Amino acid sequence: MKPSIAIILCILILGVDSQRWVQFMKEAGQGSRDMWRAYSDMKKANWKNSDKYFHARGNYDAARRGPGGAWAAKVISDAREGIQKFMGHGAEDSRADQFANKWGRSGKDPNHFRPAGLPKKY
């Protein structure tokens, strides 16, 4: 389905007006960047036991953008965990990651997962 047809269907069937649709897409884009920034920071930090903190922080920052950001965070988080599950990574770790993802998206403080000694810039 072409994107233009999907947009028209959303407008006609779901009653989503164009201004809300544009705002949702803007939030989704910003939320995607928040998720990428958290991932990049996690790689740069290379800090032991920081994975859950960066999961929670990325989801928290994205969800604060609004419904579009929360949607992007959920889609990205679920896709990442789905790929890891497919690749045979541990189900236990995936459940813990998803817990941290939901924690952040719900607006709870991601610092709950912050490991001791992680530099302040993160």
Image (tube, rainbow, N blue to C red):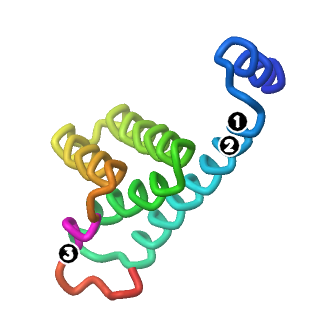
Instruction: Tell me how many marks there are.
Output: 3
Task: Say if residue 1 shows up in the picture.
Answer: no
Q: Which residues are magenta?
A: 110-115
Q: Is residue 108 left or right of residue 2?
A: left
Residue at 37% across, 63% down: 57
Disc with the residue nearer the chain's start (3 vs 2): 2
Residue at 28% across, 44% down: 98
Circle 2 is placed at which residue position? 25
Secondary structure at badge 1 equals: helix
The residue type indicated by label 3 comes to Pro
Q: Are marks 1 and 2 in contact (CB under 8 Å)?
A: yes
Does the magenta stretch mainly form a helix, a strand or a loop? helix
Circle 3 is placed at which residue position? 115
The residue type indicated by label 2 comes to Met
Circle 1 is placed at which residue position? 21
Residue 20, compared with residue 106, is above or below; it is above
Q: Are marks 3 and 1 in contact (CB under 8 Å)?
A: no
Give the spatial CA distance, label 3 vs label 1.
38 Å
- What crowding class fits label 2: few (fewer than 14 Cα within 10 Å), some (14-19), or many (20 or more)? some
The residue type indicated by label 1 comes to Trp
